[in-house]
Structure formats: C-alpha cells, structure tokens
Amino acid sequence: FNVEVPKFYALVTNLLQPVEERSSWRGMRTVGEIKRDANIKNEVNKDNLYTAVTREEKVFKPLQIPRNLQADLPYSFKPKIVTKGHDVNKDRVAVVLDHKERKIQ
C-alpha cells in the first residue's frame, strides 16, 4: 500500500526576470559575505580570549576527630599526639660520674 508524501518546499524561481537571466539568479548575501567584501573584521569578544588562571593553594585545617569517636577507634587508628618542636634531649639532666662510679661501669 503506497502512500504519497507531500513535499514541503518550493523551488526559488523568479518569473519576473527574463528567461536568460533566471539561471544566474542569486539569493541574499550572508553577513559573512558582506563583511568579506567590505573588508570588515569581527570584533573580538574579550570573554572568549584565553587568560592564564592563577589559583591559590588550598590550606586545609587539621582533621579533628570528636573524643567520643576516638574512644571507639582501635588503637592503630587513634591519632597520635606529637608536639612539634619539643626536643627530648633538652629536658634530660646531665649525669656526671666521679672516678669511682666510672670504674664500676
């Protein structure tokens, strides 16, 4: 069962022109063609230009685990409290041995 599909376009024919000029008919020129003929360049959109991006390095706060959660953690995962700049050798007391104690050791 064949169905005819109607064509929804019309060919451009200018019946007002003489027969010999009908084949040389041209439609309207595009904006690009007009600018090319007039030697006009497009304006540069500044938003489309590449600019170098400078990003600041992120500084993250130290991780803080609540105390009740720390109590439930196994020992290997518990945060170790390490004080920065504390020198263990600084707090030691110098022991000076006299000559009798040196002989014993």
Image (cartoon, grey):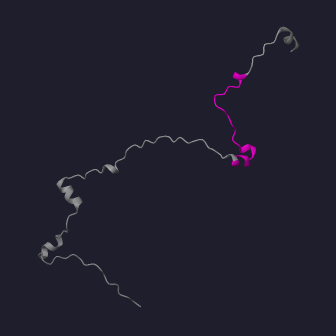
Q: x and y percent of residue 89 in the render?
A: 71, 23
Query: In which quadrant is the N terminus drawn?
Result: bottom left
Indicate whether residue 101 is drawn in magenta. Answer: no
Q: x and y percent of residue 25 in the render?
A: 17, 70
Indicate whether residue 84 is drawn in magenta. Answer: yes
- Left or right position of 37 against 103: left
Residue depicted at 57% across the width and 42% down the height: 61
80 vs 36, nearest the viewer: 80
- Left or right position of 45 against 77: left
How many numbered circles does the render carry? 0
Residue depicted at 75% across the width and 19% down the height: 93
Position of residue 71 relative to residue 20, above or below, is above
Position of residue 97 relative to residue 42, above or below, is above
Tell me the magenta residue range: 68-91
52 vs 92, nearest the viewer: 92
Residue depicted at 43% across the width and 41% down the height: 54
The residue lying furthest to the left in this view is 18
Position of residue 60 relative to residue 98, above or below, is below
32 vs 91, nearest the viewer: 91
85 vs 66, nearest the viewer: 66
Query: In which quadrant is the C terminus drawn?
Result: top right
Q: x and y percent of residue 90 in the render?
A: 69, 22
The residue lying furthest to the top in this view is 99
Residue depicted at 82% across the width and 10% down the height: 98
Q: x and y percent of residue 94 in the render?
A: 75, 17
The residue lying furthest to the front in this view is 68
- Left or right position of 18 against 45: left
The residue lying furthest to the right in this view is 104
Residue 21's quadrant in the figure? bottom left
Position of residue 93 relative to residue 6, above or below, is above
